């Protein structure tokens, strides 16, 4: 940055201003996009918005001479995929790159934000937390709209609530990120017994029960106990917490039962269980999708096994989606990045107050992505995965 002249600094400052404001609006834009899709109007507002965000971040990294290696890596891998799939007749490039772009946006967001926090970390930390808070409000308000007769159902008629978002399954990943982050932020700033903490906890619980996806309910419930345990400061309080936890667990089960029953989820889940047992209930038939796609992958020879089939194929389990679309090479690329994030969070766990929270979130996301998908290749969750993982790189003295 010191080598930049005044004009370059002004340009970089203006670009950063636009990028951060775009991060503030991420879920709001997804909400507008979902509203039009539900009306049958296909306007790629969200795609255009995120492509613009991607190129602004890439341009900024080029200007400040940081992250060029990452950009070269993205360009090389994308070019290599184009070359490989150019031998396939009638190959659907647009579907492939729409799918791949979601992962590339996550990678680009992480390295952009990593550079972004390097100057004035205290100010930048405040901006990152503001992004998380604003988008949490947008997410929760959308889900709660059903209580006043607005928004759309998660599944079919009158089953669950997804607000004006389009894909309810992608919201599960958002809850797995935003719920523990907001609980930790509020609990650390105030206390576990504060009204604000209890209110946030209650609002998130009501929201995930209204959404009704299994992964969001499980991740949010586990997050409450993990974050509460992390913030307890004495052994006596630990005992009190877990005694209280049993009481809260019964309350959650009781209230959750009423919510899920009133929105028709029990009937839906009972149908899956009666039809295929616990496996179908948990995986919703995803293992059958994999068996169907696997035969085409393996029949295509060693080239397909190494580089995949492309065309945005999905069995709604991210590990298998990565293998199907991008082969062994893509699987290694994708999961190497995620294990890099895990390593960073673990490495900083003793010197950064956020690191244990982020490590917990990353583990939850990896487990959820392997069972239900819509996380690693999620255009909604990707930028937030990047953002929270950058928090571990901010020294504790700059964290309010």
Image (tube, rainbow, N blue to C red):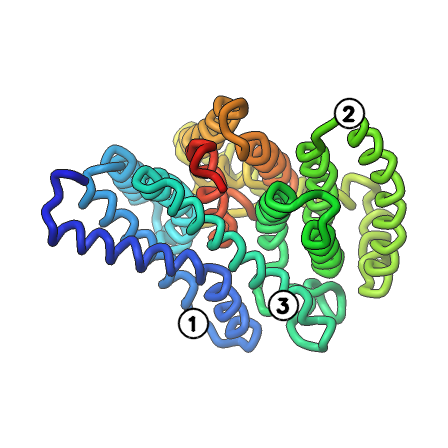
Q: Nearer the viewer, residue 10 or 79?
A: 10
Badge 1 is on which residue? 43
Secondary structure under tag 1 reads: loop
Q: Nearer the viewer, residue 109 or 84?
A: 109
Tell me if 125 is positioned left or right of 295 in this view. Answer: left
Quadrant of the image occupied by residue 109:
top left
Residue 281 at what x, y percent from top left?
Answer: 78, 45
Q: Are marks 1 and 3 in contact (CB under 8 Å)?
A: no
Task: Please give the name of the residue rendered at 55% of the width and 35% of the height, measured from the top-left corner.
Answer: 358
Badge 2 is on which residue? 235
Task: Please give the name of the residue rendered at 40% of the width and 42% of the height, measured from the top-left corner.
Answer: 122
Q: Quadrant of the N terminus?
A: top left
Of mark 2 and mark 3, the one earlier in the sequence is 3
Secondary structure under tag 2 reads: helix
- Looking at the image, residue 277 lies above or below residue 301: below
Q: Residues within 10 Å of mark 3 (few under 14, many from 20)?
A: many
Tell me if 360 is positioned left or right of 338 in this view. Answer: right
Q: Nearer the viewer, residue 264 or 198?
A: 198
Q: Residues within 10 Å of mark 2 (few under 14, many from 20)?
A: few
Of mark 1 and mark 3, the one earlier in the sequence is 1
Q: Residues within 10 Å of mark 1 (few under 14, many from 20)?
A: few
Q: Disc number at residue 163?
A: 3
Residue 195 at what x, y percent from top left?
Answer: 72, 54
Residue 62 at what x, y percent from top left?
Answer: 20, 43
Task: Kindly tell me whether residue 43 is visible in this rendering.
Answer: yes
Of mark 2 and mark 1, the one earlier in the sequence is 1
């Amino acid at each position: 940055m010191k080598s930049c002249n005044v004009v370059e600094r002004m340009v970089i400052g203006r670009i950063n201003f636009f990028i951060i404001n775009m991060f503030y609006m991420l879920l709001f834009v997804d909400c507008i996009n979902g509203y039009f899709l539900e009306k049958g109007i296909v306007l790629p507002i969200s795609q255009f918005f995120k492509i613009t965000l991607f190129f602004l971040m890439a341009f900024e990294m080029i200007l400040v001479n940081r992250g060029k290696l990452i950009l070269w890596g993205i360009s090389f891998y994308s070019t290599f995929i184009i070359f490989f799939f150019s031998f396939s007749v009638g190959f659907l490039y647009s579907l492939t790159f729409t799918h791949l772009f979601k992962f590339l946006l996550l990678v680009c967001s992480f390295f952009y934000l990593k550079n972004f926090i390097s100057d004035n970390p205290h100010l930048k930390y405040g901006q990152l937390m503001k992004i998380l808070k604003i988008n949490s409000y947008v997410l929760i308000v959308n889900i709660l709209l059903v209580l006043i007769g607005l928004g759309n159902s998660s599944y079919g008629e009158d089953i669950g609530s997804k607000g004006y978002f389009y894909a309810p399954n992608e919201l599960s990943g958002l809850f797995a990120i935003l719920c523990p982050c907001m609980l930790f932020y509020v609990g650390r700033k105030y206390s576990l017994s504060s009204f604000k903490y209890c209110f946030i906890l209650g609002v998130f619980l009501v929201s995930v029960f209204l959404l009704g996806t299994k992964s969001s309910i499980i991740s949010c419930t586990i997050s409450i106990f993990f974050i509460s345990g992390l913030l307890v400061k004495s052994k006596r309080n630990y005992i009190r917490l877990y005694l209280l936890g049993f009481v809260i667990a019964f309350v959650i089960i009781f209230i959750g039962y009423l919510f899920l029953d009133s929105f028709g989820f029990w009937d839906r889940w009972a149908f899956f269980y009666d039809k295929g047992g616990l496996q179908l209930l948990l995986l919703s038939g995803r293992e059958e999708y994999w068996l169907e796609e696997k035969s085409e992958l393996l029949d295509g020879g060693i080239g397909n096994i190494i580089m995949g089939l492309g065309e945005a194929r999905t069995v709604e389990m991210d590990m298998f989606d990565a293998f199907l679309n991008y082969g062994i090479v893509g699987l290694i690329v994708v999961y190497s990045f995620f294990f890099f994030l895990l390593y960073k969070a673990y490495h900083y766990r003793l010197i950064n107050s956020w690191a244990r929270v982020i490590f917990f979130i990353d583990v939850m996301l990896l487990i959820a992505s392997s069972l239900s998908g819509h996380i690693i290749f999620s255009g909604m969750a990707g930028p937030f995965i990047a953002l929270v993982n950058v928090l571990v790189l901010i020294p504790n003295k700059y964290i309010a």
